[in-house]
Amino acid sequence: MKRNPLFLSDKFMPASLPEVCAPRKNLLALLDKAAEDGFVFVSAQGGSGKTVSTLLWLNRSRRIPVWIGLDSFDNSPSVFYKLLATGLYSLQPDNENMKKILMDTAFSATPVEHTVELMSEMYLEDRQYVIVLDDFHLIKSGEIIKSLPLVLRRLPRAFTVFVLSRGEVPDEFRPLLKDEKKDVIRREDLRFTESEIRQYLNIRGHFLTPDEIKFAYMATDGWAIGVNAIAMSGQIGGRGEYDFADFFEDLTWNTWDDERRDFCIRTSIVDEFDTELGSALSGREDAPELMEALSRSNSFLSRLHGDTYRYHHLFQEFLQKQMHGWAVDGVMLYKTAAQYYKDHGDYSHALRYWLMSGDYKGTDNFLFLFLFRGHKNGVADYADFLHSFFMESLPERAAREAPVLHVLYAWYYYLTSHFEEYAKHMDAIIRNLPRIAKAGNEFVEFAMLAFHVDYRKPLKTQVTLFKMFGKVLKFYTPSGLATNIASFTHNLPYMHRSNRDYSEIALNPGILDKIDNTFAPLLGPEWKYLRPGILVSFTYERNQLEDALEQNTAVLRLIGPENKPDGRICVMILQHSILWQLGRFQEAGKVMDDLNEFVDASAQYFLPNLTAYRTKLRLFRGDRAAAAAWMDQYYVTETDHIEFFRSFQHFTTARAYAALGKTEKALHYLLLLREFGKNLNRPLDRCEAGVVLASLYWTMNQKKEAEAELEAALEILQPYGFIRVVADEGETVVPILKRILSRVSEKDYAGPLTRSYINEVMLAAHRFGKDHAGYMAGVIKRKDKPLKLSKQQAYMLTLLSQGYKNADISEITGLSIPTIKSHTAIAYKKLGVNNAMDAVLKARELGVIE
């Protein structure tokens, strides 16, 4: 949404407390103790009083708060960290350095790094602050959960952090807890006692007998929202334990007049609303006064900031259920919200509420603004947003009434490599093309783009079917529509393995002539260098490195300042790869320096893939520290599904796991990647996964599996003449290639592989392996030459691991200190280390000691 460029501090002020609150002295004492450690995690079910209890503590603590209320649309790193950074900036709105970082257009590309940089620019002041992350259970992003502890550790000591959640403490957060029993506040801590219920009711002017108080406690089990419902009416009700709807309907809702109930029902359709939206939804000019009165009199409507409010989620759910029996036009309410957000430039929320109206026939305009006029922060960020958008599926009639929705569906499922769903919606696009064309020419171009990446159809077939688009296409977007939708390479670093695998062109280069007059205009001026660049990529894959260098250098000269960053990065990555493979490391280093500078200045969204590429090169040299560093990156998280735009990173993760000896995890990723390559018809991805799998099987002494896996990959690669994807595994694949060559050389061999091809691949792998130990080197060494320590040497390391010094060990074992030093020195030598700490760590890693 468009906002004032100067972020106002009231945006991050906590909600106002109701006029009357229970004092909760014991609970506040618990919060005081937890806050001493700087990090408090409040974990309890909805309605337990997490928010009000924290507000009470804040009110008493006199600390300066930054309150951030979260929702499911904050579940992407760029949005989440923009909120956090803006909240921090609101504390020092005159800090120009913080403002510059916050307003940087690259913030969304590297939000974690920008947030840390912004923290470093804060003025040191003699004041105490509190950051509250409310409703944190709505944050599911593995990247946020993994990175947030790293970010919070960089806060100045003047900050205390409260996390309010319905969920348990994530494992990643446990290092932030100094004392889990003290620092985690749970439901039982938040529960009202009988004494507190009596005291609270007395404050509200309700004087119940001891038996009635006991009954109130039994009815609510001390559940805060239930106690509050009783306090608002002075009566004990409720037909079911822990049921807010029963409490509220019996004790409060039925006592309200119709005007108040009507206002609440109408405004409950949105997650938060300001006075303008509240007036539009309710049709009441006095909405601001009513909202203020409601927020003061109860804790079910809270002021978020300025004139913006939200209902407690349990109350909101209750209100939305009441809507079905109330005389309101729900369709018109959602349309009103959609129009409000459209007018304020928030096209994602506008589209969301329009779809919620159920009037799908009016979707075209809102989807157009969302797809072609909304701000895009790169593929990963956009996909994260779409994850939240697709959490709840639309009914089937939605796409029937608004066929343009098939375009959005196809793009999302393509990006996230849900190939069956993509195919379903791609087929629907073709069936509905004339209707989609009525929605606008840009939708036709988008449909063409979706068709071009359809993995089920070869390029040769696609160019012949182009005529069906020509019938409805009026013109091309001059700058190229594909280049304006997040990223035309989807942030992948090799142009021939980007939006689709273009290996088919290696067998039939004439396809490029057909593409020139069909799909190429979607790329605008980028096609000028991408066309020859794809052919250079094949020269590289065939290991014709000198020719590839000459051709790619010419391609680099075709790129000008007007071209998009994505294609430039692809060409620069290939230039570096060629020089690196040729052993011209000084020249390669210069290209890498230029690439780093360019990405940092113009394409920070590419940093994860650039880091993956650099890590891959270090792994080829046997650098296990690089593997560990890669696994520590916040965007490297566990997954059971390969998302297309992150596939390059997943290959690095698989290699890193292999280098670290975590075989099962490496196999898990490689099998996923192999199936990903098969399902999306990406032969190079499928074969790379297969080659790495073969190498891993070989180290595991599964010789037959290794041979079968590599042979399958070679049979795919041979028609193209591709060598590098196998040769890059170096000496690890050489013994497997020898066995395959031996079998291919037998007279009765009837398979497709040729001796000349296998021999060429084997020679390239051997040449590469001479200078690059490979990420499997450490694994092979441990497998071939298992480390053996004597019982005494292992015992010395075990005692060292338990914190004993040499003098202690002498007392325990009766051995002299020189003897102990002799045993440990030999152990150090066998382990290849020179101190006790490294010896213990490596011995544990190798399983020599527990």
Image (cartoon, rainbow, N blue to C red):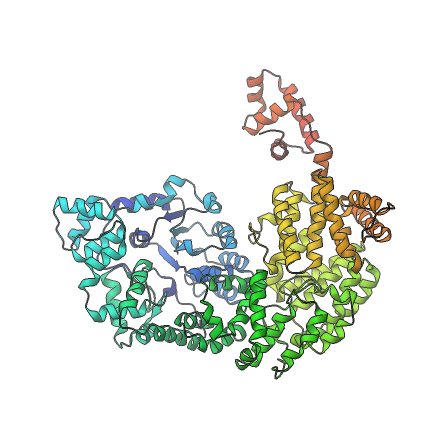
* Place of residue 523 in the rendered image (x, y in percent of width and height, measured from the top left): 66, 74
- Place residue 465 in its image quadrant: bottom right
**Lateral position of residue 759 relative to residue 280, left or right:** right
**Residue sitting at x 77%, y 54%:** 715
Number of numbered discs overlaid on the protein picture: 0
Whether residue 379 is visible to the viewer of this picture, yes or no, is: no
* Place of residue 711 in the rendered image (x, y in percent of width and height, measured from the top left): 76, 49
Residue at the top extreme of this rendering: 814
- Place residue 815 in its image quadrant: top right
Whether residue 629 is visible to the viewer of this picture, yes or no, is: yes
* Place of residue 204 in the rendered image (x, y in percent of width and height, measured from the top left): 17, 55
Q: Which of 322 and 662 is in front in this view?
A: 322
* Place of residue 116 in the rendered image (x, y in percent of width and height, measured from the top left): 52, 56
**Residue sitting at x 84%, y 44%:** 742
Depicted 289 relative to depicted 782: above or below: below
Residue at the bottom extreme of this rendering: 474
**Lateral position of residue 221 relative to residue 102, left or right:** left
**Lateral position of residue 737 relative to residue 311, left or right:** right
Q: Nearer the viewer, residue 135 or 601?
A: 135
Q: Which of 744 and 388 is in front in this view?
A: 744
**Residue sitting at x 57%, y 74%:** 431
- Quadrant assignment for the C terminus: top right
- Quadrant assignment for the N terminus: bottom left
Q: Which of 46 and 130 is in front in this view?
A: 46
**Lateral position of residue 609 relative to residue 127, left or right:** right
